[in-house]
Image (cartoon, grey):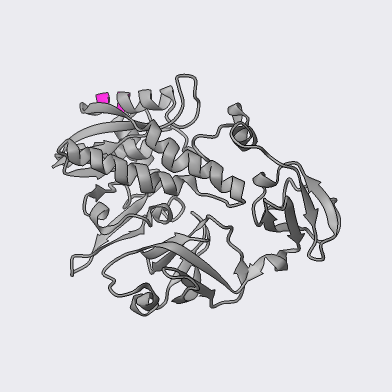
Amino acid sequence: MRVLVAMSGGVDSSVAAALLVEAGHDVTGVTMKLWGGASDTGCCSVADVDDARRVAQQLDVQHLVFNFGDDFMAHVVDPYVEAHQRGDTPNPCIECNRHLKFDRLLRRADALGFDAVATGHHARIVEHPDGSRRIARGADPDKDQSYVLYMLGADAQARVLLPVGTMLKADVRAEAARLGLRTADKPDSQDVCFITASGGGRRTFLGDRIALHPGRLVDRAGAEVGRVDAVELVTVGQRKGLGLAGGGEPRYAVDVDVPGRTVTVGQADELLGPSVVIADLVVAGPVTGPSDQLPAQLPGGLVAQCSAHGEPRPVSVAAGPAAGSLELTWTDGPQRRVARGQSVVLYAGEEVVAGGLVP
C-alpha cells in the first residue's frame, strides 16, 4: 500500500513512518509548511523540516514538503484571530486537523495516487462488525489525542492510519532509539504552534492583527472592581492576569463581553453550570434521521470531555435549543462552564461518538 506519512519532525511521526516501512508499505514522508519563514522558531521551523527530512533519509524513503500556508491562514489563523475579537476561546489544533491534516492533505494524497495518509497521533481507529469505524482513545492515557480527532468523518477514517496509537509514549521513544532516529529524544511540542514566546506570545501575535481594548472588571452586581488592558485576551475561567487584589476567595472571569469592554468576575461556584450546549456537530455513524432525533440514536452511558486531557464526566443527552445542537446535562452535579469556541467530545467507553463546539 502506498502511504503518505505526515512527518512533523517529532518522534511520534518519525516512528509512525518507521513502523509502516517495517510492515512493507511503500512510504513517502511529507512535511506541511504551514507557517513562518526561515527565521521562525515555532510550527514548521527550518529545524523541524530538517529533522523530518533526515529521518526520511534514515528510513530510505522519499520526503516531500507541501506549502499549505494559504489554507492554514484561511482556516486556522484568521478564525483564531476573529474568535478573540468576539470573546471566544478557539482551539486552533482542532481546526488544523479538520481543515489541513485530514482534508487538504488527504485531497493531495488522493491526487497523487496514495492509498492512505498516516500521522503520529496517539489515537486508534476501530472497525465494527457492520463496517462502521470510530476514533478511539490511544493506548497511553497521558498522551491520548482522540479528543482533537473527533472531527474525522467516515471517509477520512477509512483512509487514515495511526500506527503509534497502540503504543505507550515510552515505547515510541524506545523504538526510535532502537532505530537510531535523530528525533528519539526530541521534546514534545507545546502550546499553540504558530505563537512563540520569542515572538512575544499571544498578546503580541493578536496585537499585531487586531486592536486590543482595555476593559472593566465588574462583579455580579455590576460594581467595578478592577481593569484589564486587553479584554480580547481574557477567557472564561481565567484567574491569573486579571490584576485583582489578593486576599479573600479567589475570583475568576465568569463572562467576557468584548463589545461592552466588560469582564464579569465571580467566585469558583459562579463558574458552575448544570449543562452545556454544543453545535456544529460531528457524529460517528451510522446515524439517520433529523437532528432532534439524534439523542435517541446515541448509546447510553456517555461521558463528555471538555479539553484535550480533561476528566470525562457522565452526561445525559437531549436535543439542543437550536437545530443541529445537543444539550448535555452533567449527571454528577454542576461542572465548570466551557468557554465559547471550545470543543466538547462525547465518548462511549473508549470510542468517540460525537463532538461539537460551544456556541
Q: Nearer the viewer, residue 340 or 170?
A: 340
Above or below residue 104? Residue 319 is below
What percent of the width, then of the height, locates residue 234?
67, 49
Locate residue 298: give its quadrant.
bottom left
* Residue 284 seen: yes
Outermost residue on the front side: it is 259
What percent of the width, then of the height, locates residue 222?
81, 62
What percent of the width, then of the height, locates residue 227?
80, 47
Q: Is residue 117 left or right of residue 168?
A: left
Task: Name the image quarter holding the N terminus.
Answer: top left
Q: Nearer the viewer, residue 80 or 185?
A: 80
Q: Nearer the viewer, residue 299 or 342?
A: 342
Q: What are the residue bounds of the magenta stretch?
A: 54-58
Above or below residue 103? Residue 283 is below
Residue occupying image coordinates x 43% and y 32%: 185
Locate residue 6: give its quadrant.
top left
Dominant secondary structure (helix, strand or loop) of the stretch shown in magenta: helix
Outermost residue on the bottom side: it is 296
Above or below residue 136? Residue 322 is below
Q: Is residue 228 left or right of residue 187?
A: right
Is residue 57 one of those drawn in magenta? yes
